[in-house]
Image (tube, helix red, strand yellow):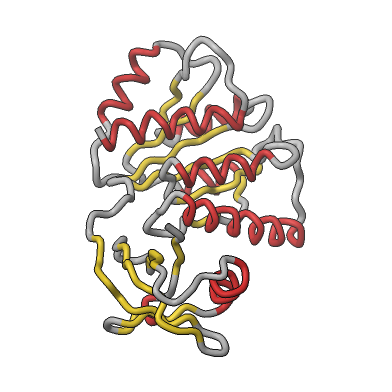
Amino acid sequence: MYRFFVEPSQIQDKRIIITGSDFNHIKNVLRMKTGEEIAVSNGVDHREYRCGIEEYTEDEVICALRFIKEDGVELPSKIYLFQGLPKADKMELVIQKAIELGAYEVIPVAAKRCVVKLDEKKAAAKINRWQGIAEAAAKQSKRGVIPTVHSVMNMQEAIEYAQNMDVRLIPYELAQDMRRTKEIIESVRPGGSIAVFIGPEGGFEESEIEEAVKAGIEPITLGKRILRTETAGLAVLSWLMYQLES
């Protein structure tokens, strides 16, 4: 079933109005007919509104509400992925898969070892593209919200942004004791906020790790193998998803 996001104001009692690019997609790309069912979310209350296409106007799809599915698909905790900017188009993969795994927000981090350097103009264009990928991934995985891709931060800004989050982790290749990692993951409980810091290719510099530790962020090991930057965050998100939903 196809899923679309609307503003809360577009849900009017038992009618739902779809406009803009989604109108074009439904009518001209999917060529959906009246009577066919779609799922709609407003990105606020985590409900899924099931509705049937009633009619097309010049620029709107008018749908009739059939029922509301109350049980949400969102994780019971908000996970913030602080991802060191990787090379090439790896960030697109990270964002797509992180959204599928339940990340609430993705924050690109311009760490010291990042090869990619974005000026203000390029950064704005990248964020727009990344946000589009996040929205597409949210629709595909039937999320109740469209997670935000934040503007690029440096490491100090990222640490400050995460300072009030309940659990703050930074995988580090020199960290040891997998039992400690297991204890931390198993201690995570619903209702909190979780920050996960992932370094770029080459990892974080020692000074960045020291800065993070000083701020109370805990280094953890992900095992005996060195994971690529596009793999490490997804591994942690998978563990957290399992813990929060089991």
Q: Quadrant of the C terminus?
A: top left
Count of numbered badges drawn on the protein: 0
Residue 48 screen position, x and y as percent? 32, 63
Residue 173 screen position, x and y as percent? 55, 17
**In the displayed structure image, the side of residue 12 where residue 201 appears, left or right:** right
**57 over 165 or under it: above or below:** below
Residue at x 60% of width, y 46% of height: 108
Instruction: Judge by depth and name the residue closer to the eye, 18 or 233.
Output: 18
**48 over 188 or under it: above or below:** below
**200 over 143 or under it: above or below:** above
- Image quadrant of residue 231? top right
Residue 219 screen position, x and y as percent? 45, 24
Farthest residue toward the bottom? 58
Instruction: Judge by depth and name the residue closer to the eye, 22 or 164.
Output: 22
Q: Quadrant of the N terminus?
A: bottom left
Residue at x 61% of width, y 30% of height: 229
Residue at x 49% of width, y 52% of height: 140
- Image quadrant of residue 218? top left
Residue 34 screen position, x and y as percent? 44, 77
Residue at x 27% of width, y 37% of height: 245
